[in-house]
Image: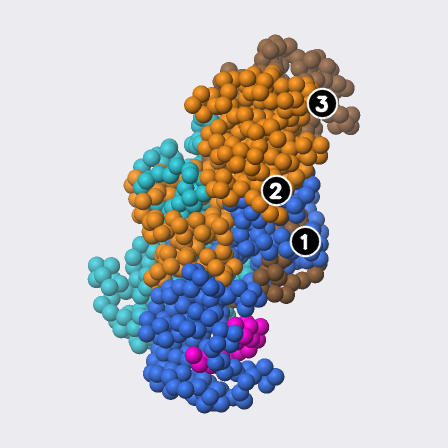
Chain colours: A orange, B blue, C brown, D cyan
Amino acid sequence: MQLGLVGLGRMGGNMRERLRAAGHEVVGYDRDPALSDVASLADLAGKLQAPRAVWVMVPAGVTDATIDDLAAVLDAGDIVIDGGNSRFSDDAPRAERLAGQGIGYVDVGVSGGVWGRQNGYGLMVGGADEHVERLMPVFEALKPAGEYGFVHAGPVGAGHYAKMVHNGIEYGLMHAYAEGFELLSAAELVTNVPGVIKSWREGTVVQSWLLDLLDRALDEDPELAELSGWTEDTGEGRWTVDEAVRLGVPLNVITASLFARFASRQDDSPAMKAVSALRQQFGGHTVRKP
Amino acid sequence: MQLGLVGLGRMGGNMRERLRAAGHEVVGYDRDPALSDVASLADLAGKLQAPRAVWVMVPAGVTDATIDDLAAVLDAGDIVIDGGNSRFSDDAPRAERLAGQGIGYVDVGVSGGVWGRQNGYGLMVGGADEHVERLMPVFEALKPAGEYGFVHAGPVGAGHYAKMVHNGIEYGLMHAYAEGFELLSAAELVTNVPGVIKSWREGTVVQSWLLDLLDRALDEDPELAELSGWTEDTGEGRWTVDEAVRLGVPLNVITASLFARFASRQDDSPAMKAVSALRQQFGGHTVRKP
Amino acid sequence: MQLGLVGLGRMGGNMRERLRAAGHEVVGYDRDPALSDVASLADLAGKLQAPRAVWVMVPAGVTDATIDDLAAVLDAGDIVIDGGNSRFSDDAPRAERLAGQGIGYVDVGVSGGVWGRQNGYGLMVGGADEHVERLMPVFEALKPAGEYGFVHAGPVGAGHYAKMVHNGIEYGLMHAYAEGFELLSAAELVTNVPGVIKSWREGTVVQSWLLDLLDRALDEDPELAELSGWTEDTGEGRWTVDEAVRLGVPLNVITASLFARFASRQDDSPAMKAVSALRQQFGGHTVRKP
Amino acid sequence: MQLGLVGLGRMGGNMRERLRAAGHEVVGYDRDPALSDVASLADLAGKLQAPRAVWVMVPAGVTDATIDDLAAVLDAGDIVIDGGNSRFSDDAPRAERLAGQGIGYVDVGVSGGVWGRQNGYGLMVGGADEHVERLMPVFEALKPAGEYGFVHAGPVGAGHYAKMVHNGIEYGLMHAYAEGFELLSAAELVTNVPGVIKSWREGTVVQSWLLDLLDRALDEDPELAELSGWTEDTGEGRWTVDEAVRLGVPLNVITASLFARFASRQDDSPAMKAVSALRQQFGGHTVRKP
């Protein structure tokens, strides 16, 4: 089928290729003319037969502006898909705005990172049945072959919600492996830490794709000496904890993983300075100067 | 090669089958005559040609007694393997006792649970090079085919240590998925929680064998309504935290997972009763009777 | 000085008494005529000489409506004080609305609970210098005698912000004591748990007013047998964690305390059901039925 | 009464003064002749009338050796008191060794740090009723005046156990304040962080001796700029978590506080390096070099 695709960066570019390889006709637009198939969003709309489907794959900060621009060149009966990293709570307001013009809206959480083009993307979809059904050929082409990798999770917003939880879990999984790696590295008895990690890739309860990647990383740098622990967090981890707080769900593991990222970006911990100050006050304990 | 195998319960019995299927000659002993190939440990020793290798696969509580009984019927040059859930710190004393008789000792952490017979067992091995080398045919038969599933992690104790950390990680991984499941279940937007879990099995960053098992469980019972959250912990999780404390390694995620198991077994939380009491004292807040 | 006081429940009623005892003229209004000094807000405004100061002490859910009603009967130059449990982020919008009428706005976080009437209330104040200065006689009367118990923490919103953090800390403090109480109760060696708590009230590093209250509670019920651990959380704990997430500040202790309250209200943990399901799948571990 | 006191460092020296001020006859011994009242332990024993009581106040590492030396010069009917930072599990073996000579043993957890001489020490005592009764005059002199500051917590070991839990709670309390301080410091709205802390000293739920000390520290250094967050941990925090693990008690807050100290001593987090490596592998996320 025909699909408009707005945003041809690392993710969007790879998706265009995967879709074309599956026989779909993709008209791509990007602000960078070197990447773009068309000169403008109007151009893009003109190249697609109504009812159109246009997938937006841009940084979360410009998604709303992009969708508004797009809406100006679309018609009733068209569908806009947001496959970016939007917060789920942005979806319903967007869907409502577009519905005012008779335009449908579907949100898609997309997993798979740089590996998606080859392996297929995990897709979590939110939207009305009729809209999701119309888009199934696109979803089929993007997802991995076989039974898994796609879900219609619920109404508008459910796709980004499921993706948010996916990422929250991802934080926890990564940190569990990371803690194990640190403990092994500290232990006197274990003399072959990368070998232990590698061995776990089959026959064990902890085998996973993330573990495979950790093994790859250790193949390249067995002590991770070339990396600092300074780690960004993207919005999804924070939104997951926000939701835990809103819904009263205790998420100790995922939250600890998020907080560890916060701590990784601190030169020194103000909280620990306060602890240090208290110990000095009551115990006369020696403290360190910065 | 020939192998003596002491303990033919769920794990030991399956291992005997996998080893025999690989062409090894296994002489098995179990206290239950219905499972045993021989009448006694002496009998077992008599059926094996020196230098012997005898794998002990019994509950952790009786491992030391079993090894002592076994040592009485073995000779210098033999090797004892402990593949049970021993604490790593029990290995060196055992190795020393056996070394006094000229008997070698190798510790093996075995992962794979009920799936091991079919898929192969993940093996983490501690011991001297010469002992490990002699046992390689057995390890090759037990481990999964291919590159992974086996590591000689270090000297005596390193196998159980690596297995302990493996289980600690396992606690963290399970709890990360579990928290995600709980948040999805609490969310208003997501109407198809089992479908979301199932979709993650391919194309996503969180794909893993544990996730596959969670999907299986939800296929059988989509809301896990037939289960209580009451959950045992085996020693490895506790030992992991003990080691974190001993070595000064911050293991927030793994420890939170362990503590969640402790909490799952409490009818009511004494700590929360104290919080409740305090709130009543200072705020006149309403409290609940038990 | 003259003060209007809207809301004469437990907190407001006690504050009226403390203010009158200090010689201030308080005109109180409450929807309950049995408590109220006047028949209506208009009445209240009529009894006060301009420029007026009116303190609002109502449940957080009706604060905005109350302030809007009040604004309708006030004049430019008057000041509205919100001493309730508002989220700090509600303060600036309110201040702006009132500023449109020339009415000032000051937010006050009030601590002290049921003990405040006797001991004085801890006051954390946000607002413009000129407004805060005009209200100082009221603050002086409400706060404890002496050097402490009052701070002008910053501009509008800072008072509720400081109170929010105060409550977040309070969650952590209470839970630290609560965990210690639970561990003592579980220990074989300690035969006099209430005695240990009582002894800590002087000469120790952990002495505090909260500890005094815990001792009081244990005097009444040495094993807290009359209480359940089911515990509410008010908004401040959640807002504190929200802010931690927004600002990237790792608040492991306060968040764990909040999550423990969430868990205290669950009959069973959905997350632990998932853990239980996983253990059954991979290990054949016995699980419990609900 | 007469008391032998072994170890006249900061703690022991202050205790000698407080005891003498209360009219007791203290014979002190220290390896440093400049501090010591007598030339040797034998000398000390010679100066005390039987049945003797000798209080040992030496670093935990040399307590056992000191007690053994002391036992060599004592007689049946004497009592040895250990007031140092021993692990509770060392007490019963010591008591048994001494009982073999007919010597009694009492363990005392002592709180109060550098403030104890002036304010009195919080004393948590373990031992047999008859031994504790004989020592009451000493305990009365050391403890603060009034109702609090002393408990006979249980049999031998219970004193150090109660002190261990006291210190575990102390970790949690300090960290709760520390987190609040960090959040206030990060907040845009609060312009007077030390003022907020100071205000809390009266009229609030969070008032405590530790808060007073934090205020003192901020008086000296309002941003704690002269301190690093690098913080030691003494044994009691670790033992508390060990006990939580042994007894199956979930101590999330205290453990998080301990782990934060571990983290404060790391230049970089090996765990976060592993997280960083994973993010680079799956997402092509930019990472930092060390």
What subunit carries mark 2?
A
Task: Name the mark on residue A56.
Answer: none
Q: Which stretch did the figure color magenta?
A: B1-18
The x and y percentages for residue B84 are 49, 72
Image quadrant holding the C terminus of chain B, namely bottom right
Query: Which residue does the image show at 48% across and 69% down from the upper left?
Result: B142
Per the image, label 2 sits on a secondary structure element best described as strand
Asked whether disc 3 touches disc 1, contact meaning CB atoms under 8 Å apart, the reply is no
Asked whether disc 2 touches disc 3, contact meaning CB atoms under 8 Å apart, the reply is no
Looking at the picture, does residue C28 appear above or below residue D269?
above
Q: Which residue is mark 2?
A: A150
Q: Pick the residue in front: D205 or C251.
A: C251
Q: Amino acid at mark 1?
A: Asp
Give the spatial CA distance, label 3 vs label 1: 60 Å
Number of other residues with Cα within 10 Å of mark 1, as a class: few under 14, some 14 to 19, many 20 or more: some
Q: Amino acid at mark 3?
A: Tyr
Looking at the picture, does residue D287 appear above or below residue B63?
above
Residue B3 is one of the magenta-drawn residues? yes
Q: Which residue is mark 3?
A: C29
Q: Which residue is mark 1?
A: B219
Query: Which residue does the image show at 54% across and 25% down from the upper left?
Result: A27
Give the spatial CA distance, label 2 vs label 1: 16 Å
Instruction: Say left or right for D33 vs B162.
Output: left
**Which corner quadrant of the image does residue C48 belong to?**
top right
Q: Amino acid at mark 2?
A: Phe
Per the image, label 1 sits on a secondary structure element best described as helix
From the image, state whether disc 2 or disc 3 is nearer to you: 2
Looking at the picture, does residue C140 appear above or below residue A251?
above
